[in-house]
Image: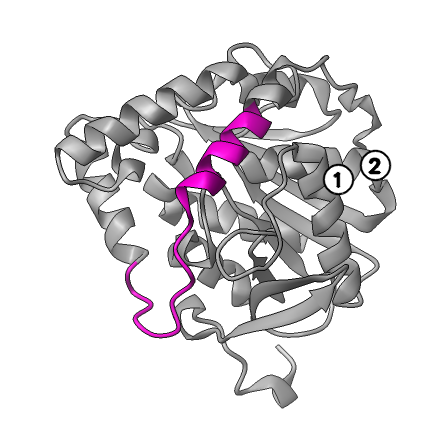
């Protein structure tokens, strides 16, 4: 690390929320880690804001890399209206990245964020150096459009048990999954000040519709993705079926695939102690 950056923030809970104006939208974002080099921009999941990133994933990466998280247009504290297509979300992400002055980034994406990342890299290949795609799948992927039904079902289950929906959506409801789910939700609460604006129900509905359309669209030609790509998931993803991670791996040349046992959509969070070093090594190569 650069000695002049001794006071650099490396804990996500301490990263201040900032805003930048671009294309008529004020984007909320946080940054941490040592400046310089290619930054790692995190693309967040469905109905999620800045507070939904697991610090056990962000912090190890921020120890060695400049990390940026952001709220997409109309989500959390970012202004404007929520986009109703994955491709439009990708266009906004490009607007945000270019507003910060970067001509190349690494992307770390989870779930819906992984779909946005794919759309972005296919349209703007020169902007992306490396890709980390977790808990996600390709356009036209098998059963991708079933995400909507699964999401509403698990939100209902969570409401009835006064739980966080992510405990149902991201983790297996078994002896290993339940404690992992509670630990994950607790970690998301470690930040106590400067919390983000809660995500509205309308945002969830609009984004779910975008995922459904993405799932029902023609399969994308991913042969154009030549960037080093790391793909990861749990072996029992109910939201974005695990077979879609294997599908991505087959279709993206020379990609790496990591599947964690006895885990669901949030496999990388359940196995953060194993996955974070893999991601750090991949981004550092």
Left or right of 83? Residue 61 is left
Q: Name the residue under label 1.
A: 120
Q: In this view, does 244 lie to the left or right of 122?
A: left
Colour scheme: one colour
- Residue found 56% across the figure and 55% down from its top: 71
The residue to which callout 2 is attached is 123
Assess disc 2: are there few (<14), some (14-19) or many (≥20) residues with their C-alpha within 10 Å of its C-alpha.
Answer: some
Q: Is residue 62 visible?
A: yes
* x then y, percent, for residue 142: 56, 10
Q: Name the residue rendered at 28%, 26% in the picture.
A: 154
Q: In which quarter of the image is residue 117?
A: top right
Foreground of the two, 221 or 248: 221
Task: Tell me the quarter of the picture where residue 29 sits.
Answer: bottom right
User: Which residue extends farthest top?
Assistant: 142
Measure how far apart labels 2 and 1 are at the Cα level: 5 Å
Crowd around label 1: few <14 · some 14–19 · many ≥20 (10 Å): many
Q: Do the residues labelled 2 and 1 touch (CB within 8 Å)?
A: yes
The quadrant of the picture occupied by the N terminus is bottom right
């Amino acid at each position: 690390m650069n000695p002049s950056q001794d006071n650099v923030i490396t804990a996500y809970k301490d990263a201040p929320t900032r805003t930048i104006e671009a294309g008529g939208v004020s984007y909320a974002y946080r940054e941490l880690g040592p400046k310089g080099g290619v930054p790692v921009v995190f693309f967040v999941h469905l109905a999620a804001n800045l507070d939904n990133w697991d610090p056990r994933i962000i912090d190890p990466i921020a120890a060695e890399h400049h990390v940026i998280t952001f709220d997409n247009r109309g989500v959390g504290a970012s202004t404007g209206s929520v986009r109703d297509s994955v491709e439009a979300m990708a266009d906004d992400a490009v607007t945000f990245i270019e507003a910060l002055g970067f001509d190349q980034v690494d992307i770390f994406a989870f779930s819906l964020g992984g779909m946005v990342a794919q759309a972005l890299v296919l349209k703007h290949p020169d902007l992306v150096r490396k890709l980390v795609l977790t808990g996600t799948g390709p356009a036209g992927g098998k059963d991708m459009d079933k995400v909507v039904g699964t999401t509403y079902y698990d939100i209902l289950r969570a409401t009835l048990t006064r739980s966080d929906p992510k405990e149902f959506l991201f983790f297996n409801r078994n002896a290993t999954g339940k404690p992992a789910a509670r630990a994950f939700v607790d970690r998301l609460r470690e930040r106590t000040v400067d919390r983000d604006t809660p995500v509205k129900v309308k945002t969830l509905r609009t984004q779910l519709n975008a995922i459904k359309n993405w799932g029902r669209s023609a399969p994308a030609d991913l042969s154009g993705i030549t960037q080093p790509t790391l793909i990861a998931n749990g072996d029992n993803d109910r939201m974005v079926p695990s077979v879609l991670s294997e599908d991505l791996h087959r279709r993206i040349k020379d990609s790496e695939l990591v599947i964690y046992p006895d885990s669901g959509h949030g496999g990388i969070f359940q196995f953060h102690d194993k996955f974070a070093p893999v991601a750090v090594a991949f981004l550092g190569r």
